[in-house]
Image (cartoon, rainbow, N blue to C red):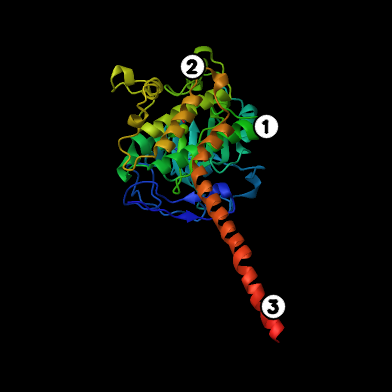
Amino acid sequence: MYHLGISKSSDPDNVSQCSSIYHHERGCSSQSGEEGSSGTVRKHSSLSYGHVSASPLIGLPEVSHLGWGHWFTLRDLEYATSRFSAENVLGEGGYGVVYKGRLINGTEVAVKKLLNNLGQAEKEFRVEVEAIGHVRHKNLVRLLGYCIEGVHRMLVYEYVNNGNLEQWLHGAMRQYGNLTWEARMKVILGTAKALAYLHEAIEPKVVHRDIKSSNILIDDEFNAKVSDFGLAKLLGSGESHITTRVMGTFGYVAPEYANTGLLNEKSDIYSFGVLLLEAVTGRDPVDYGRPANEVNLVEWLKVMVGTRRAEEVVDPNLEVKPTTRALKRALLVALRCVDPDSEKRPKMSQVVRMLEQDEYPFREVLTNFLLQMLTINYLFICLISPYYILIIFYKIDKE
Ligand SMILES: Nc1ncnc2c1ncn2[C@@H]1O[C@H](COP(=O)(O)OP(=O)(O)OP(=O)(O)O)[C@@H](O)[C@H]1O
Ligand SMILES: [Mg+2]
């Protein structure tokens, strides 16, 4: 079933669609994204993001406020996560374990307990975290603060309540239905905007280095919230498991980065291209379960598009297929992003513009409509109004 509701916002970018997003019985409710955690259905805290709401840090001790966020004690976070209990584990990635928590003021948070704290000098850690902490965008997960105590290093993020893109495409969230094409494109466009911001709008720019579907969190209005930006740099010093980590995730890594370690924003753009192909096809970037010529998503796509079989690559789980025009646009953008020559890849701001051009037909319709209205008014003025003027003159004359 489809639902389409547009909620207004002062930010035109913020127009949120809920949903025509996914086919199923959940409607636009807010449920937890994790499998197996108590209950699954959760109500939004009034402090959750997405709506204009009080600061998630209101009510916390003022002495610990940083310019941009909060300095948490280990005790604060032990309290929030019930002593880092197993039921509160949201998952584990290359940087550490992530726990769900609730602060004393009621704000829901995700606490990332970092693995490689040894050797990370306190000052260096603070400088880097504060650099990330200052970065704000509606498509970036907000960092609320951090904890440095003894060997512990933790990052405290806003909690994003609707799973991540990987779970929606291939994992736990599939039980709730399939993401529609519109939802996928909304998530992709939000991701593109977040990257354009990190690469082009702030100084010094931030290269994410680990763009992949599990790092694209999703809120209950299907806005993308890119997570873990800046982490690779923050944790990149030293430790060997981190060195492999910095190499990003298999299947998403740009060839020049994999071969030479050369890293700039162009490698994020490559990973974004892979992400877009993943969203269109519903396939993993590397899938050994498929025939040899289909294992690598990018290579398979190039062959399919080159042999004019683009229509066949669409995720078979999509109940309503995209229009040919929308599909071709998405594939074109993705293939440009995964160009082996990093110089030929578009900038993220160009990617945003290209993806937004899909809205062009609506603008065209609107322009035609306005033109028609103008013509009608013009006809009225030219043909009908002289007739009225004559009548008025006639009346005045008689009087
Ligand atoms: N702010 C958050 N709100 C809700 N869930 C989160 C948040 N941050 C992370 N998670 C969830 O926690 C789990 C673990 O995330 P984590 O970032 O550690 O692993 P990952 O994304 O798979 O790998 P990587 O280490 O490369 O980022 C994921 O399921 C992720 O969706
Ligand atoms: Mg992550």
Residue 255's mark?
2
For label 1, the SS is loop
What's under tag 3, amino acid-wise? Phe
Query: Ligand 1 within 8 A of label 1's CB?
Result: no
Instruction: Say which label, 3 or 2, has the lower sequence index.
Output: 2
Name the spot of residue 151 as percent of width and height, x first: 54, 29
Q: Residue at image x 33%, y 34%?
A: 315
Task: Measure the C-alpha gap from mark 1 to mark 2.
Answer: 26 Å
From this view, report whether residue 381 is shown above or below residue 23. below
Q: Which residue is mark 3?
A: 393
Please give the name of the residue rendered at 64% of the width and 77% of the height, measured from the top-left corner: 391
The residue pinned by badge 1 equals: 203
Quarter of the figure with the C terminus: bottom right
Q: Quadrant of residue 234?
A: top right
- Element type at marker 3? helix
Residue 26's place in the image compared with 85, above or below, is below
Give, as a three-letter code, the residue at label 1.
Glu
Residue depth check, mark 1 versus mark 2: number of the one nearer the observer = 2
Residue type (three-letter) at the residue carrying disc 2: Pro
Mark toward the viewer: 3 or 2: 3
Which of 160 and 186 lies nearest the eye of the viewer?
A: 186
